[in-house]
Image (cartoon, grey):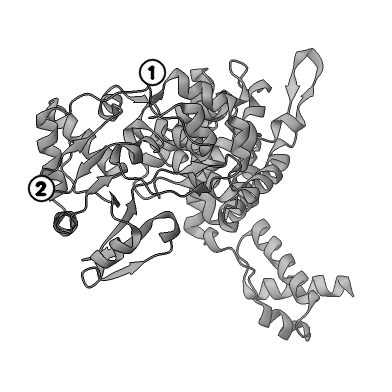
Amino acid sequence: MARSGTGDDRPSGEPVPPAVQATVRELVDLSPVLTRLGARFTAAGFEAHLVGGSVRDALLSAAAADGGRAGTSTKPGDLDITTDARPEQILDLLRGWAGSTWNTGIAFGTVGAEVSGVRVEITTFRADRYDRESRNPEVAWGDSLVDDLVRRDFTVNAMAVSLGPDRTVTDPFGGLGDLLAKRLRTPGAAVDSFADDPLRMLRAVRFVAQLGLTPDGEVVAAMTSLSGELARITPERVQVELSKTLLQDSPRAALELFVDTGLADVVLPELPALRMEIDEHHQHKDVYTHSLTVLDQAIELEKADAEAESPDLVLRLAALLHDIGKPATRRHEARGRVSFHHHEVVGAKLVRKRLTALRYSKEIVEAVSRLTFLHLRFHGYGRGEWTDSAVRRYVTDAGDLLPRLHKLVRSDSTTRNKRRAAALSETYDSLEQRITEISELEDLARVRPDLDGNAIMELLGIGPGREVGEAWKMLKDLRLERGPLSREDAEAELLAWWAARS
């Protein structure tokens, strides 16, 4: 089906203020590649326009500067160009000028090129039709810039800057006004846009986090009614958009939209399932709200740690999903209490299953699953009753995830009771102090048996095999229990173990 065209009820543009026009021209001219490319296409009799996120961000910066607010004068990053030239004509214009070209997207009218170290993608005006069964359009070339812009996802991305001498800003659907009003709308009817390409609904979620935009009622209604269409999108593309959303500075509002519109029910059903599960430790809020708060707090701790990776996708996924085992483990106890025994075990399995289905890397899947499994262990620490052996095991089981585990556990305290919150923080301070003290005496980051495999085989007179692995594990457990042993003591323990086996 074809997309509906614009009508009287669609967003309309207003003249772009002259000061904004001038500032955008300056921002575009910061890229010599754009200047030279525009001159080349103009000389050949073709239009060329910068489109996409670089225009959006340049206009936002220019408008901010014009309004007396802080703007940034940075040259555009990813360069997306649209033109009335056909793909073969684009290749002719680039030949002998671009350092290299590639035509992997030429069936969709896109030619890629590298010019002076800058990557650009140049696409012929499009007037596509969609079959509504896949995201693959029936490609059709267009003859009008406005017709090309109307098929784009949102008004804030349906703006263009001419690379001709005039550098005219084209904003037919009010994208600049929407940017300034922090409003998210579609150029055409939202239901048509999302039915054409359901991935746009996840992009809407991301733009809430990335740009701080609020979708208008039509967009929210369309997302809600068409949420089931998200099943048409491949897991890989869903994963990319979900990750981009989580990696923004403040993803909470976007995740709430993700859940409220029903999109999460399709691709991450474990998240909305938390809404009905009341956490016995935080009776003032449900587990869903608690999880979003944990994410907020984890992001703050992440940003405050100058030595840590930021944004940290593993930590943010763990913060959001650490309690997804609760719905399956909910039990009603005496006196109206609710328990979630072993929800960390069930949750770790659910995390592994869901993130694998979303095609996350094996490393990310295992890291988030392990953090989920370990996030409750600290609550057995009490007031410091753990033995040194228990502290060693905590550190060893966390491995290189220990800094993230520290942040996750601290973020998991969302109680409004200031005295209880202070007590939990003080208790975890105590655990970290003990880890530091033991680490000063032992290399907790690399706990190994006091005898390696070669020494085990030599002492026992055996070759490689299962027995060596069992002996190694016994010595590792002994090392965790008692700390470093002298070689003599380690050999004596190994021989005693071997004799008991025999």
Tell me the amino acid under the disc marked 2: Pro
Question: Seen in the image, is 175 located left or right of residue 331?
Answer: left
Residue that extends furthest to the top in the rendered view of this protein: 335
Choose the circle earlier in sequence order: 1 or 2: 1
Question: Seen in the image, is 448 located left or right of residue 19?
Answer: right
Residue that extends furthest to the right in the rendered view of this protein: 502
Are dots 1 and 2 in contact, CB under 8 Å? no
Label 2, secondary structure: give it: loop
Question: Seen in the image, is 120 located left or right of residue 97?
Answer: right
Tell me the amino acid under the disc marked 1: Asp
Q: Is 389 or 362 nearer to us in this picture?
A: 362
- Residue occupying image coordinates x 64% and y 41%: 377
> In the rendering, at what x and y percent does residue 334 appear?
81, 16
> In the rendering, at what x and y percent does residue 429 appear?
48, 38
- According to the picture, the residue beneath numbered tag 1 turns out to be 9
Local packing at callout 2 (Cα closer than 10 Å; few below 14, some 14-19, many 20+) is: few
- Residue occupying image coordinates x 34% and y 23%: 11
Q: Quadrant of the N terminus?
A: top right
Real-space Cα separation, disc 1 to disc 2, in angstroms: 34 Å
> In the rendering, at what x and y percent does residue 138 appear?
50, 48
Question: Seen in the image, is 90 located left or right of residue 292?
Answer: left
Q: Is 443 or 120 nearer to us in this picture?
A: 120
Label 1, secondary structure: give it: loop
- Residue occupying image coordinates x 22% and y 40%: 58
- According to the picture, the residue beneath numbered tag 2 turns out to be 165
Q: Up-down: is 326 above or below 481?
A: above
Q: Up-down: is 480 above or below 238?
A: below
Q: Quadrant of residue 381?
A: top right
Q: Quadrant of the C terminus?
A: bottom right
For the question of whether residue 468 can be seen, the reply is yes
Q: Is 434 or 209 nearer to us in this picture?
A: 209
